[in-house]
Every structure is written in C-alpha cells, then in structure tokens.
Image (spheres, grey):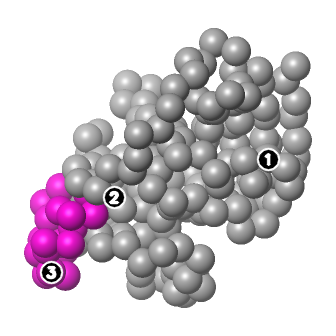
Amino acid sequence: MGRSFDAVPDQLAEWMVAQPVWFVATAPLAGDGHVNVSPKGDDTFRVISPTEVAYLDLTGSGAETVAHVRENGRLTIMFCSFGDKPNIVRVFGRGRAVLPRDERFDELAGRFPARDGARGIIVLDVEQVTSSCGYAVPHMELVGPRDTLAEWAGRKNDEELAAYRAEKNAVSIDGLPALDP
C-alpha cells in the first residue's frame, strides 16, 4: 500500500541513492507551457538531509529543469525499482538551481564525484514523499552505465562548454531564462 511522509525516511534514502535511473518533472506556470520529464542517473543523486535532496546537473541539450525551478520552484523526483522488489517513490517540493557562482555550490559539489560538464546542482526542499507499489513497472536488468555524455564533455574545454551552454541552455523551449551565458 502507498505511504506518505513529511521527510525522506532512512530506509527510502538508501534505496533512492542506489537506483541507477530516476526522473525529474517540472512545468512552467503558463498553462500552454511544456511539462518536462527528464531521466537522470550515473551516481548524481544525494540525500543531503531528510528534508533536502540534490542532484548534479550535467550539461545537456536543454535546460528545462533549471528554467522551471527558477520561474516557480515546482519539482518532483520519481524513482522506480526495476529490480526484484517493486517500488515507486516520489519526492515533491520546491527546487532551486545552485550554480558554480553561488555560495553553496562548493559544499554541495563535494558530495558528488567530479564530472566533466557539470553545470550546477539542483536542490529540492522536500515537502512530501510518497511510496506506492510499482507492481506494473517491468522487471529489468541493468546492463551498465552509459559513458557517452562523459566522453562528449571530456573532449571539450571550459570555453567550449560555456559556448555550448550559451547556445543550447540559455532559455527553455518555452523561452524562459535558464542558464545565464
């Protein structure tokens, strides 16, 4: 049966960090804006405290999550078990982008492995955590991590990454400001 919590319980914290893939969902305030759901993974999620979680935001082809949390803060993170024991966990709350120029960036970045192409950290202030059965989620086996993004970012220097972000990550697909060039 589903359960609801005001904070991340210890047993769920360990389980969430162990998941190889998870998803973030955001939306702009505009009713005709695009709802965004993005898959994440590669050891980039951390439980900072029972009421705060964070993930390392890597350079990608868009910056919807950053734009949406800058505009309105709404963020949901969802984890699904694809292994033997079915489970779905959603973490709801207010998100914010912590960028390399921000005061808290170095403290948070120290919690993650160094990654080429890291452009920021998304922090979620937890308001509610729910769990549900996950009985309809398929049982699948992990083949392994994908190195494509790390290899791409590793071939670029800081200036090339900054130029890519200025071109691809400055605004969301709805025109909201995302990463400052």
Amino acid at the residue labelled 1? Leu
Amino acid at the residue labelled 3? Asn
Q: On the image, numbered disc 1 is attached to which residue? A: 12
> Could you give the CA–CA distance between mark 3 and mark 1, rounded to whole angstroms?
38 Å
> Between tags 3 and 1, which lies in front?
1
Above or below, comparing residue 17 to residue 5 in the picture:
below
Q: Are marks 2 and 1 in contact (CB under 8 Å)?
A: no
Q: Which mark is residue 178?
A: 2
The residue carrying pointer 2 sits among few (fewer than 14), some (14 to 19) or many (20 or more) residues within 10 Å by Cα, namely: many
Which stretch is magenta? Answer: 149-168
Frontmost residue, 11 versus 94: 11
The x, y position of residue 69, in whole percent, is 50, 53
The x, y position of residue 144, in whole percent, is 41, 46
Q: Main secondary structure of the magenta part?
A: helix
Q: Residue at x 29, y 70 (%)?
A: 117
Who comes first in sequence, dot 2 or dot 1? 1
Image side of residue 43 versus residue 86, left or right: left
> Could you give the CA–CA distance between mark 3 and mark 2, rounded to whole angstroms?
21 Å
Frontmost residue, 108 versus 12: 12
Is residue 116 visible in this depiction of the protein?
A: yes
Who comes first in sequence, dot 3 or dot 2? 3
> Could you give the CA–CA distance between mark 2 and mark 1, rounded to whole angstroms?
31 Å
Amino acid at the residue labelled 2? Ala
The x, y position of residue 9, in whole percent, is 87, 51
Helix, strand or loop status at disc 3: loop
Who comes first in sequence, dot 3 or dot 1? 1
